[in-house]
Image (spheres, rainbow, N blue to C red):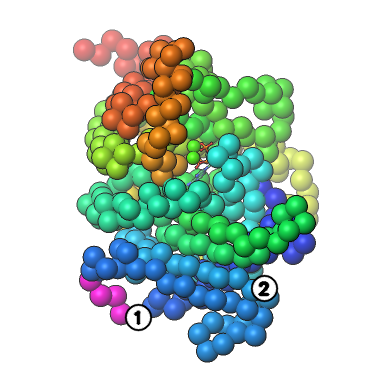
Amino acid sequence: DRVLIGNKVSEGHVNFIIAYNMLTGIRVAVSRCSGIMKPLTPADFRFTKKLAFDYHGNELTPSSQYAFKFKDYCPEVFRELRALFGLDPADYLVSLTSKYILSELNSPGKSGSFFYYSRDYKYIIKTIHHCEHIHLRKHIQEYYNHVKDNPNTLICQFYGLHRVKMPISFQNKIKHRKIYFLVMNNLFPPNLDIHTTYDLKGSTWGRFTSLDKERLAKDRAYRPVMKDLNWLEEGQKIKFGPLKKKTFLTQLKKDVELLAKLNTMDYSLLIGIHDINKAREDDLQLADTASIDEQPQTQAPIRSGTATVVRHFFREFEGGIRASDQFNNDVDLIYYVGIIDFLTNYSVLKKLETFWRSLRHDTKLVSAIPPRDYANRFYEFIEGSVDPLPQNKKPSSYKDDP
Ligand code: ATP
Ligand code: CA
Ligand code: CA
């Protein structure tokens, strides 16, 4: 059984009401958006819809336990996007809202965003900053076109952009707060352990996660996200043979071009590695220690409909892509890769940060650099990180081949 991540957000949790309102809003707004699909018009990319919820409900909105307002951004566009990504509308709603239970990620990023997983771990809700939401709305058409033209894009899949407005008590005062959030795909599989995770930016400035090596060996739930310096220190490579390498880098280049064009920076390539042999060892160990009735019960599947199968080069094997050697043969690792966190606009703030930091450091090390430079540095770093197998691990029988 896989290691569960995060804390359950159920009734009584500090963020339960926020989560409840988010899910109620999604349930009502998404199920409402279900007529015949018409070709999108430019207006669809600007359209927003507001809903008001309260305890009594009315002919437009069903009753809700709490009073709040909900805003749905370009619902028709996201509906198209979900269809493009092969999601079944009923499945989507069931996964997110069947039980109103989410898991909150233990360590939200330093941006202050919160992350919630749907109960089946397929979807992630991320709260975002107002300016990130502006950035996405401004470029939603370009995002849509890119996804449509690039079925194998590495860019994270977005399924919905919403806002809840609700009273929140802060220092004994009640204030109405607006919370913007995105629904996106969990890049990692719900049913397999990810043994190692890297978040790579191509920058070395502050890009190190210190690890508790002892704990790492013992505690399966301790899976810190490592960064560029860890990657370099460990001499890590993405092990793709020539065929996969070419497809990967070609797609990466296109994706990065888009992000540069959108004036975006600070994004990462998220890489999760599932080690097939390690998983096998873990399973044997578990089978040894657990008697039959102690074994974790498998959760009943909560999917209802049938999703259309949309093929994706990087999700063909257990939702990820197998590593390969220099002869394009499979290696016992599965990668889960995607570009995340690409809604940071190169704003005045970043320009200032670049200025101050560049006074003291080589700009190659700095994280906040103009989008074009960021894109080049990012691409070059990843390009230099793809290599089928380290020289000394080449299968010996091939060594002397011409
Ligand atoms: P910061 O701006 O400080 O980097 P953030 O709050 O914007 O942080 P992200 O960079 O989006 O957060 O994500 C933080 C971490 O959450 C990632 O390093 C990754 O481990 C996890 N994560 C984010 N998005 C996904 C996703 N789509 N699938 C799986 N894991 C994700
Ligand atoms: Ca980030
Ligand atoms: Ca961020």
Among numbered discs 1 and 2, the one appearing first in the sequence? 1
Local secondary structure at mark 1: loop
Which residue is found at the position 55% from the left and 57% from the top?
Answer: 179
Give the residue at the far bottom of this rendering.
Answer: 59
Up-down: is 204 above or below 19? above
Up-down: is 397 above or below 266? above
Q: CA distance from mark 1 to mark 2?
A: 28 Å
Q: Of 367 and 322, which appears nearest the observer? A: 367
**Residue 97 seen in render:** no
Residue type indicated by callout 2? Tyr
- On the image, the x and y values in percent for residue 339 come to 40, 40
Give the labeled residue for mark 2. 66
User: Which mark is in front, 1 or 2?
Assistant: 2
Q: Of 359 and 221, which appears nearest the observer? A: 359
Q: Which mark is residue 230?
A: none
- On the image, the x and y values in percent for residue 155 come to 36, 45
- On the image, the x and y values in percent for residue 143 come to 30, 51
Q: Is residue 61 magenta?
A: no
The secondary structure that dominates the magenta segment is: loop
Which residue is found at the position 41% from the left and 13% from the top?
Answer: 362
- On the image, the x and y values in percent for residue 328 come to 30, 31
Residue type indicated by callout 1? Gly
Q: Give the magenta part as a residue range.
A: 35-39
Indicate the quadrant where residue 313 lies.
top left
Q: Is residue 330 left or right of residue 175?
A: left
Q: Is residue 109 left or right of residue 380?
A: right
Q: Which mark is residue 35?
A: 1
Up-down: is 263 above or below 19? above
